[in-house]
Amino acid sequence: MTALRQLGATQQRLLRHLLMAGEGGTVESLCMQLHLSHNAVRQHLSALIARHYVERTQSKPSGGRPTACYRLTETGHALFPRNYGSIATALLAQLHERLGDSAMESTLRELGHTLGSREITPPPETPSMEVVHILAQKLDALGYEAIAARHGEEWQIEAFNCVFHALAKQYPQVCKFDLAYMEAAGGRRVHHMECIVRGGHVCRFRLGASLSEKKDDGGVR
């Protein structure tokens, strides 16, 4: 069940009205549209503001006193379905048809590297354990449900949610995006030790050598 469906019917209707209202709605307009009292509308608005789905703003002055308005926040907009999966699958299918396996994999690596390069990379002397925790936090923020986990004497990254699961099942090259992103963001070689798509319990990643060291050594390590 989506987060929107977990809300009551009245709050769902209120959010949909704000979605269509553009610059927002007033308490008065919401009362008329929802057939509720001022007190009931304000209670619903307070509950939705507390959940960061709605925020209070002011209407543009039209010669009179500015009126308090309410509009959806980014979190509120995100409650409504956005079908990225179908679009991404169609794009990858076309990419695969035009480029083939090898070129498609190179393109996904390049995309992952580009996005990872926008992150602040830890200095080469940063301890591996610290880099693991940094990368786990970055992946977790992207929806991977990632943690830093200890395996013997070593810290590794474990991700419990494959955000590209459906895509990766059809196009395994998608996993190269994750690896390239982490390598660029962490400045370390990353090895894919376990994969959910290939039957693993988690996606598990192990850090390798510093990329700056590999470059200094002429690429031999």
Image (tube, helix red, strand yellow):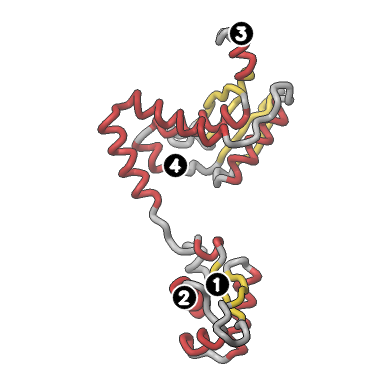
Mark 2 or mark 3, which is nearer to you?
2
Three-letter amino acid code at disc 4? Phe
Three-letter amino acid code at disc 3? Asp
Structural crowding at the residue carrying mark 4, measured as other residues with C-alpha within 10 Å and reported as few (<14), some (14–19) or many (≥20)? some
Q: Residue at x 61, y 76 (%)?
A: 58
Mark found first going from the N terminus, 2 or 3:
2
The answer to whether mark 4 and mark 1 are in CB contact below 8 A is: no
CA gap between label 1 and label 2 equals: 8 Å
CA gap between label 4 and label 3 equals: 35 Å
The answer to whether mark 1 and mark 2 are in CB contact below 8 A is: yes
The residue indicated by pointer 3 is 217
Mark found first going from the N terminus, 4 or 3:
4
Structural crowding at the residue carrying mark 2, measured as other residues with C-alpha within 10 Å and reported as few (<14), some (14–19) or many (≥20)? some
Mark found first going from the N terminus, 1 or 2:
2
Q: Residue at the far front: name it.
A: 63
Mark found first going from the N terminus, 4 or 1:
1
CA gap between label 1 and label 3 equals: 56 Å
Three-letter amino acid code at disc 1? Arg
Q: Say which mark, if any, is on residue 71.
A: 1
Q: Residue at x 33, y 42 (%)?
A: 91
Q: Secondary structure at mark 2?
A: loop
Three-letter amino acid code at disc 2? Ala
Q: Secondary structure at mark 4?
A: loop
Q: Which corner quadrant of the image does residue 217 belong to?
A: top right
The residue indicated by pointer 4 is 164
Q: Say which mark, if any, is on residue 21.
A: 2
